[in-house]
Structures are given as structure tokens and as C-alpha cells.
Image (cartoon, rainbow, N blue to C red):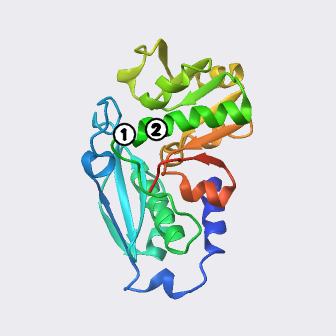
Amino acid sequence: MNFYREIKERFSRLIPDEALWSSTVNVVNVRPLTPQEVIGKPDRDDFPLLKGKEVMIQADFKGSLGQAFTDMPGNFKGSLREVFQLPLASNFERAVFISTINAVLRYLGYIKDTVHCRNQEPAKCASLIKDYILEKYGIQKIAFIGLQPAMVETLATAFPIRVVDLDKENIGIRKNGITIEDVSHTEEIIAWSDLIIATGTTAVNGTLVPLLNKKPIIFYGVTISGIAYLMGYEQLCFCGH
């Protein structure tokens, strides 16, 4: 929990107005979104969101939106202070907390890409990420944490890549010549790799911290937008809104 405590402390330093914490006007509203609200109609149907394995929840703070993926969706309504009083003991509470951070930091102007890309944009983002890595890092062995099929397909055309995922139904399945491995192989795969690319959802499900300080790491997606800003992590989200 020290990880989340540090996030709270860094976030709190940015709040300029005590009224933002407790005002009954400045209420945080959090609700789950349908897959179509989140991603529209992409060219492929194997995203975890479309398979029902993950749900995007959305926080609305004074009209600014922040999103976070979770496997434990639900509704929440309360003040910013009430969000920060959540014990963060479950994926639901952490998703509420993280989506709220995204919404509030967007409202304050610190970040802007906090809403998921749609339709053909996930494929475009994957291509841009491939080009970015080639330009900045060159050919690298990639440990990819959390199956995102469009990115895995694109990155596999340019890099040696191994993929781990939490979804037991994916383990052992081959995607574009890459066998999806169980998360129990994560340490081995990181040791093999030169570069880690990880879903920001690791901040929600509590698996982020063990990935740090081992190899260069890039997080992708809107979930981690606020945390990446607060903690100084490298994040790629070329088509977020």
C-alpha cells in the first residue's frame, strides 16, 4: 500500500482549493461503460473489453472525465475526500480511485488523454507505438504484460516478444505466432527481455510495483494517465481523448 500512499501524497500537493475535497457540488460520479461506449466498433473482436473480461469505469468530476479498466466494476458517488478515504483493498476501489485521479488531474489541466480510443484508433496506436520503440530504443526483446491483441500483433512483426496475461482462458493460445504465457512466468520473461511494455491496468489489479526497477518500462493506455504524470512513468497513449 505504500505505492498508493505515495500517489495520494503527490496528488494532494496539486489540489489548490480545499473546497475541491469536500464540496457537495464537486461530486465524483463513477459508473461502468458499455463496450460500445468505450471502444466503438473496431476491426477486431478479441479485445478483452469486447469479450467481457474487463469493464471500463468512468469518473466524472465537474465535467472532466477519467477512465480505468477493471475486472470489478460498480458505481460510486461521493466527494473527492471520500474517494481518498477508500481503503483501496479491492480492484473496484482502486479503479474508482484511479479513474478519479484521471478526471481531477484533467480538470486541473495537468493531463488530457483520459478517455479510451475508439473504432480504428487502437490499431493506429499500435502502429505508432511500434514506430516509437524502434526510433527510441531500436530492436529490443519485449516483455509484454497484459494481452492487448492489436499491440501484440503489430509489435510481433518487428520485435522478439513474450506475452503474459492474467486471463486463464488465454494461456497457451497462440496469437500471431506468440504463445500467451501465465503470469507465473513474469520474472523469467522480464529477465529475458530488454524492455517491458505493461498495461496501465496493473495499477488497478495491484501487479504494477513488482515490474518496477528491473528493466526500462513503458506503460500504455488511459488507465495509468494520472499515475504516470504523478510518478514520472513513461506512458504511451497516442490516440486517447
Q: What number of labels is visible?
A: 2
Height in image: 154 above or below 9?
Answer: above
Residue under the image location 51 percent in, 64 percent down: 101
Q: Residue 133, position in %: x, y?
A: 65, 33
Residue under the image location 27 percent in, 41 percent down: 41
Q: Residues within 10 Å of mark 1 (few under 14, many from 20)?
A: some
Mark 1 lies on residue = 120
Q: Identify the secondary structure beneath mark 1.
A: loop
Residue 127 visible (yes or no)? yes
Q: Name the foreground residue: 92 vs 199.
A: 199
Residue under the image location 54 percent in, 68 percent down: 105
Residue 48, image quadrant: top left
Q: Name the foreground residue: 216 vs 53.
A: 216
Q: Are marks 1 and 2 in contact (CB under 8 Å)?
A: yes
Say which amino acid is labelled 2.
Lys
Q: Which mark is residue 124?
A: 2
